[in-house]
Image: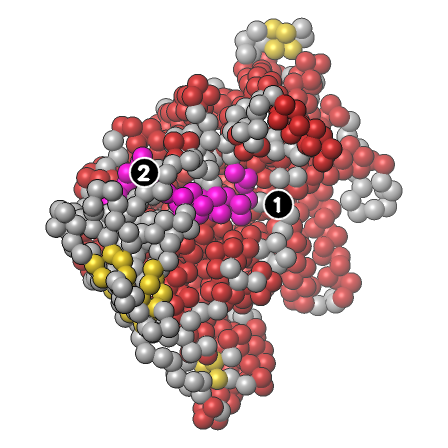
Amino acid sequence: MSPISTPDGSSPPARPANSPAGEPTASTERAAPRPRPTPEPDGDHPTQPATRETEPDRNGNDTSKPDPAGNDATTPDQNGHNTAGPDQNGNNTATPDQNGTDATTSHPGSLHLSAPDRPGSADVGSAAERATRDLAAQFEDEKPGRVLTGPVGLILTGVSLAVGALALWQVFRPLSQGSKFYLIIFLAGVLPLVFLAYPADLRLPARLRARRRRVASDSDSTNRDSDSTRARPTATDWVLVALAAAACLYPVLPVPIGTGGGGYNAFLDRQGLLAPVDLVLGTVLLLLLLEACRRTTGWILPAVCLLFLGYGYYGGLLPQSWPVAHSGLDFGQLVDAFYNSDSGFYGTPLDVAASYIVLFTIYGAVLELSGAGRFFVELSAAAFRRSRTAAGRTAVASGFLLGTVSGSGAATTVSIGAVTWPLLRRAGYPPERAGGMLAAAGVGAILSPPTLGAAAFIIAEYLGVSYLQVLGWATVPTVLYYLGILLSVEIDARRSGVRPVVVDVGSPWRLLARFGYHFASLIAIIVLLAVGMSATRAVVFATILAVALSFLAPKNRLTPARLVTALVTGVRGVLAVTAVCAAAGIITATTTKTGLGPQAAALLIGWAQAATSDPTLVLVLTALLAAVALSLLGLAVPVTASFVIGWVIVGPALLDLGVTAPAAAMFVFYFAVLSEVSPPTALAAVAAAAVTGGRLVPTMWQTLRYALPAYLTPIAFVITPAGLGLLGIGGVGRVAFAAVVTALSVAVLAVAAGGWLPGVGPAGVPERVLGAFAGVTLLWLEPVPVAVGTALAAVAAVGVLVRRGSAGRPSSDPVEEKL
C-alpha cells in the first residue's frame, strides 16, 4: 500500500483509477515542487508522518535537510504561509503565518512527522510519494505497469468497472450457466487489460537501440524517451488485446465457426474431441497467458510453465523405468486439458482470483482511500511512544496492522520503512539490522489474518473448507511469528545499545476514540464468517461498512468519484494475479494428466527412505527435503504459483506419510510465503535494503534471523500429531500445550540468535549453541523431547546468569521524537 506521508508535507496523491502501484500520476509527472504550509488542526485526521528530518550540527543546533525532491520544507511559500527555519545562529525557530497558524519548534536531534495540509487530497503530487511507490513496485512479485490517460485510460477504466460490477453481481446473483461460464467472461475482461496496462518491456540489442535513438533525434523526437514510449500501448499491444478477447470469448459465442463454435454447451460437449478451431484458439490463449505472465512477473514463471508443457509432450520419450515417465500426450490432448477442462485455465486458481481476490483487493483499496493505513501507523507509534524499544516496536506493529489490509510483503516493507526508518536510525539501529526488521515485519502481511495471501483462498478451495477455518489455522503461527520478531527487537535494543526514543504522538486511546472505526470492517469480516456467511459476501458487506464509516472523516469520505477509483484500483490490482492463476492451470492440468504428483511424491519419499527405514525419521527427512524444495521453488516464482506447484508436487508426499491435509497445506503455504525473505532473492529484504541504504547480503541474513520462527514452526505441526494444536486443531489442552511449548522454543531461539537474554545480559557462544539445540528440540512436541529441551534451555539460562557481570554498555539518554 502507499506510504503514509510525504517529505514535503503535502498529502499523498491518490492514484488515478487506471494507475498501478509504483507509477506516478500523469498530472504530477513534472509538477513543480510545492513548499509546505503548516497544517491547521482540523480534527479530521490523525497526524501524518512525513520523512523530512532535521539533524543537529556540531554545536548541537538544529538544521534542516531538504526532502528527496530537493525542496526545503522550512522555507516560506509565496503565500507567506508559516514555515520554520534556522536563524542566524543556526537555531531552528518557528513563526506564525499570516493566518496565525503557529509552527512547531524543532529540538536538536528530533524528527518531525507532521500532517499534510489536505489529507486525502487526490490532486496534490509529491516526488517522494512517487519515489516510494516506484520503490515498492520494483520489489513486488509483479512488475510496474503503465499510467494510461486519455481515451485509452477511459477504456481501461470502463472495462475495469464492468469487471468489478460483474464480480459483485456474481456474489449475489450467480450466472445461471455456472461458475466456469463466469470465469470465461472474467478472463475475457481481465486478460486484454493486461496488455494495455503492462508494457512488453523487451530490450532491443544495443546496436538497434542506438539506431533507434538516432532516428528519433533526426525526427525531432528526442523528448520521447523510453518511459514515454512505455506509457502508451503499441500497435502490437492492440493486436494482443484483440486476440485475447477473441480467444477468451470464443467458448461462449453462439456462432458456428466451421466444425467449432456454436456456444458454451457445444464447446463443453467437445471436451476430449476438440475441433481444429478449438485447438487453434486454445493455443492462442496458451501463448497469450504466457506472455501476460512474462509482462507482469518476468520470465521465470513462463519458463516453468513451458517446462511442464514440455514434460507433458515429451515425457513419453523418457525411459519407462524412470519414476517420472508417463505414456505421453499429444499437443491436442494438452490443449484440451488446458482449454476445456476444470483443471486447466479455468481451474481452482483462476476461480479464487475471480471470486475472492478481486473482492479483497477492492476492499483494500476502499480502506486505503478511507485513511485506514495512516491510522494504523499512527496507532502503532502511539502505543509504544515511551518504551525503550519504541522505534522497533512501531515498525513491527505497523507491519502487522498494515498487513491486515495489504497482503503484500515487499510493498508493506517499503511503506513502513518510509515512515519508521528515520526513527530506527535515530535510535541507533544499523541499516542492515533495521532492514532485516522491516523486511520480516513486512512479510508478516502475507501471514496476518484476515487478509492472508491469495494462496490461503486456494487452500480453502482445494480442501473444501471455509476461509474462516484457514484463518483459524493461521492464527497461532502468526502470533508466534510476531512474538519472535518482537523478542528479537528487544534483544537487539539491549545488545546494540539502542537509544530509547520518546515518540510524541499523543494518546493511543484518543486515536482509537477518533479513528478506531477503521477496525470495524475488519471485525465485521470475522463476525460474518463466524455466523456462516461466505467469504465473498462477508468482504462485500465489510466494504460497504468501510464506505459508510469513511464519512466520519469529511476529508476521507468516499464520494462516488472516489468509489469508482477504489473499484478500478481493486480490479487493476488483480490483473497480475489473474494471469498467474490462469497460467497455473498449465501446471495443474499437466500434473493431473501425467500423474506427476504421485510419482514425485514417491520419489521424494524414496530419497528419505534411502537414508533410514524408521518411519518417524522418514517423515522428518521428507519434511526437511520438502522445505528445501519449496524454498528453492519460491525463489523463482510468485507466492501463488509457488503454492500451486508445491501442493501438486510436495503435498502428496506429506499426505502419503500420514500428515493431515490442513497441516500439509499450511506447511506448503508457509514455505511458499517465506521465499520473500529467503536468500539469495529475498524480495522483501532487497526492498528494505533499498530503503535503509544497508548492504544487501547482511540485510538478508538479518531478515533470516528475525524470521527464523516462521521456518521452524511449520515443521513442528507436520512431524508430530500434537503439532496440530498450532493450527487450532484438537482440544483446548492440545492447543494450549502446543502454543506454550512452541512459544518457549521461539523465545529460546531468539536468545540464541541474538546473543542476549533480556533482563539478564549477554549470552556466550556455549549458551547460544545450547539454546539453539534446546529450541529445536522443543519443536518436537512430545513429552520427552519437551522435557529435554526445557532442561537444556534452563542450563543455558544459568550460563547467562554466570556471565551477568559482562552486561552490555548502557544506552544513552532518550531521544525526543515527534510524530
Q: Which residues are magenta?
A: 116-144
Of the two numbered discs 2 and 1 on the same chain, state the one appearing first in sequence. 2
**Dots 2 and 1: beta carbons under 8 Å?**
no
Assess disc 2: are there few (<14), some (14-19) or many (≥20) residues with their C-alpha within 10 Å of its C-alpha.
Answer: some
- Residue 290 visible? The answer is no
Assess disc 1: are there few (<14), some (14-19) or many (≥20) residues with their C-alpha within 10 Å of its C-alpha.
Answer: many
Residue 656 % position (x, y): 65, 53
Quarter of the figure that contains the C terminus: bottom left
Asked where in the image residue 394 lies, by quadrant, the reply is bottom left
The circle on residue 124 is 2
Q: Nearer the viewer, residue 214 or 545?
A: 214
Q: Is residue 587 above or below residue 628?
A: above
Q: Nearer the viewer, residue 173 or 212?
A: 212
Residue 150 % position (x, y): 42, 21
Q: Nearer the viewer, residue 330 or 424?
A: 424
Locate residue 438 relative to residue 676 in the image: left or right: left
The amino acid type found where label 2 is placed reads: Val
Write down the residue under mark 1: 637
Q: Give yes or no for residue 141 being in the magenta stretch.
A: yes
Residue 382 % position (x, y): 27, 62
